[in-house]
Image (cartoon, rainbow, N blue to C red):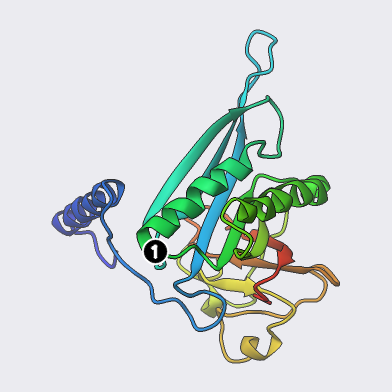
């Protein structure tokens, strides 16, 4: 905020809480027009993660697998699926049935099943990329068979990694925000050298940071409130939608 204004701050908080309640009750607070390209009204966005509980009394506690998926073409309404599975298991055991539910609900709301699926997977260590990708991509492909022989959605499978030591810093104060970090929206991608020359916030070319031949990039989507902001490392393991 540009100045200390208690009344203005209270009003902003009131509106923010109201929007959260409205959203959780099924309302739509805002919509973003999909960019021209991969995303359109036939695209279903999915996010998934597995939470591992700490051991209790020497026993391995069950792990909790969760997926969240859009139920309309604008991807502003979502539904969740939650499963309990064997403890310390990273692969989502019941992903097939979870995706059947997501695709079915998308089809009910839009009267058409999604033609494209973009699947964001969190919580996977680098050593498990291949194992998780093979198992979970296979599960997504198996789902199509549940809806008939003519249904074959294109899938893009993306790992979202936050447990890494990569940080990015500005060369001058003019490129910093008020916390000393680079502004939100920073993308570090070897495929975006041309845009780097026209934008202080846009993509930067750095062949020593991203993988030499894999499709990966770093995105710092939010402002850092305290300390040095940590970008998310996105690794695209399967890309039938040609998002690259």
* Residue depicted at 71% across the width and 37% down the height: 90
Of the pair 39 and 215, the residue shown nearer to us: 39
Quarter of the picture holding the C terminus:
bottom right
Residue lying at the far left of the rendered structure: 7
* Residue depicted at 40% across the width and 52% down the height: 78
- Mark 1, residue position: 111
- Estimate the x, y position of residue 41 in percent, counting from the top left: 44, 72
Residue lying at the far top of the rendered structure: 57
From the viewer's perspective, is residue 217 above or below residue 47? below
* Residue depicted at 63% across the width and 48% down the height: 122
Label 1 CA crowd tier, 10 Å (few <14, some 14–19, many 20+): few
Numbered disc 1: secondary structure = loop
- Estimate the x, y position of residue 228 in percent, counting from the top left: 59, 57
- Residue 44 left/right relative to 3: right
- Residue 218 left/right relative to 210: left
Of the pair 172 and 217, the residue shown nearer to us: 217
User: Residue 111, located in which quarter of the rendered image?
Assistant: bottom left
* Residue depicted at 23% across the width and 59% down the height: 4
- Residue 183 left/right relative to 161: left
Quarter of the picture holding the N terminus:
bottom left
From the viewer's perspective, is residue 178 above or below residue 57? below
How many callouts does the rendering have? 1
Of the pair 15 and 234, the residue shown nearer to us: 234
Residue 161 visible within the image: no
Residue 221 visible within the image: yes
From the viewer's perspective, is residue 153 above or below residue 60? below
Residue lying at the far right of the rendered structure: 212
User: Residue 8, located in which quarter of the rendered image?
Assistant: bottom left
- Estimate the x, y position of residue 152 in percent, counting from the top left: 63, 64
């Amino acid at each position: 905020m540009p100045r200390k204004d208690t009344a203005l701050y209270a009003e902003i908080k009131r509106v923010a809480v109201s929007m959260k309640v409205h959203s959780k009750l099924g309302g739509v607070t805002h919509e973003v027009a999909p960019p021209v390209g991969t995303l359109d009204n036939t695209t279903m966005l999915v996010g998934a993660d597995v939470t591992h509980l700490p051991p209790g009394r020497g026993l391995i506690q069950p792990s909790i697998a969760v997926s969240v998926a859009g139920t309309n073409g604008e991807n502003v309404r979502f539904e969740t699926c939650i499963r309990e599975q064997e403890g310390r298991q990273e692969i989502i055991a019941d992903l097939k049935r979870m995706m059947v539910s997501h695709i079915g609900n998308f089809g009910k709301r839009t009267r058409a099943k999604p033609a494209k699926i973009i699947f964001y997977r969190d919580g996977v260590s680098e050593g498990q990329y291949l194992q998780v990708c093979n198992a979970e991509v296979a599960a997504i492909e198996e789902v199509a068979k549940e809806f008939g022989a003519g249904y074959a959605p294109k899938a893009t499978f993306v790992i979202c990694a936050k447990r890494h030591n990569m940080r990015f810093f500005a060369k001058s104060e003019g490129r910093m925000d008020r916390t000393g970090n680079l502004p939100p929206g920073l993308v570090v991608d070897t495929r975006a050298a041309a845009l780097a020359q026209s934008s202080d916030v846009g993509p930067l070319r750095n062949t020593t940071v991203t993988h030499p031949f894999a499709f990966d990039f770093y995105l710092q989507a939010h402002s850092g409130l305290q300390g040095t902001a940590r970008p998310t490392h996105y690794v695209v393991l399967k890309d039938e939608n040609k998002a690259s």
